[in-house]
Amino acid sequence: MLPLRDENRAKTFPVVNLALIAANLGIYLTVFLQDAVRQHAILRSYALVPYELLTFTKVVGGATEVPAVATLLTSLFLHGGWLHVLGNMWFLYIFGNNIEDRLGHWGYLAFYLVAGMVASLVHALSDVHSVVPTIGASGAVSGVLGAYLVCFPRAKIHTLMILFIFIKILRLPAVMFLGLWFLVQVLNSSMETTAGGGVAWYAHLGGFLWGAVLLLLLRWHGAFVPRSR
């Protein structure tokens, strides 16, 4: 299930959203061009490690000693492969411009970063003894998806559906597309074993719920009204 575009034109130019996409791609390319030893050192230094974050104990060495709390932020801009970074940035490109339009440039930047940090914290709390480094913008992007659900539940999402030999482009309302996306995250998180599957599913769930709840609170306080298109 891949979103191709939405029928939801933003009124303002999404300068922050595009800057975030450029930053993530630029950092990934910079790391990718390093030799294997340097790549490993960067990832071990700036990735989030749940046990380190929650115990303030450095157990995963790297090139630089970054405070564990700082990795809540630094880990958001690192990715493990092209599919990882391109997938995250494609979702951000489709959905982020409208949230920036709704929250304003600086408000959106703060929202994105906090969503990512909250998602990372949820992941850490879901596996407090883990010393596996965690990276990626998925939690922040999930926060954007949760916000989109609240702001634009009826916006149409052109979606590529592939199921065995069934390939079709469907025009789904955002509430259906994002509801299915969230259900997939719940199912995957419930099936994950203690050995882990390489994906921080609880970060996805935490980011999504944080984004949705925050935007519901803003709407309740009259900060905006949802648009039906």
Image (spheres, helix red, strand yellow):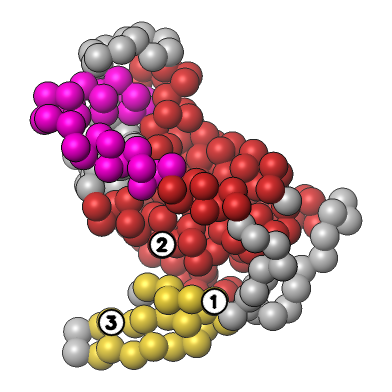
If you read the primary sequence from the N terminus, does the residue marked by circle 3 or circle 2 appear first? Answer: 2
Report the amino acid beneath label 2: Trp
Residue nearer the viewer, 57 or 87: 87
**79 relative to 155, above or below:** above
Stretch of the chain drawn in magenta: 23-50
Residue nearer the viewer, 217 or 2: 2
Quarter residue 87 falls in:
bottom left
Mark 3 and mark 2 in contact? Answer it, CB < 8 Å.
Answer: no
If you read the primary sequence from the N terminus, does the residue marked by circle 2 or circle 1 appear first? Answer: 1
**157 relative to 201, above or below:** below
Left or right relative to 181: residue 98: right
- Quarter holding the N terminus is bottom left
Element marked by disc 1: strand
Q: Position of residue 185 (x, y in %)?
A: 40, 58
Element marked by disc 3: strand
Residue on which the image places disc 2: 90
Residue on which the image places disc 1: 6
- Within the magenta stretch, is there residue 154? no
Residue nearer the viewer, 226 or 11: 11
Picture disc at residue 162: 3
If you read the primary sequence from the N terminus, does the residue marked by circle 1 or circle 3 appear first? Answer: 1
Residue at 39 percent of width and 88 percent of height: 169
Can you see residue 126?
Answer: no
Element marked by disc 2: helix
Residue at 54 percent of width and 64 percent of height: 95
Can you see residue 216?
Answer: yes
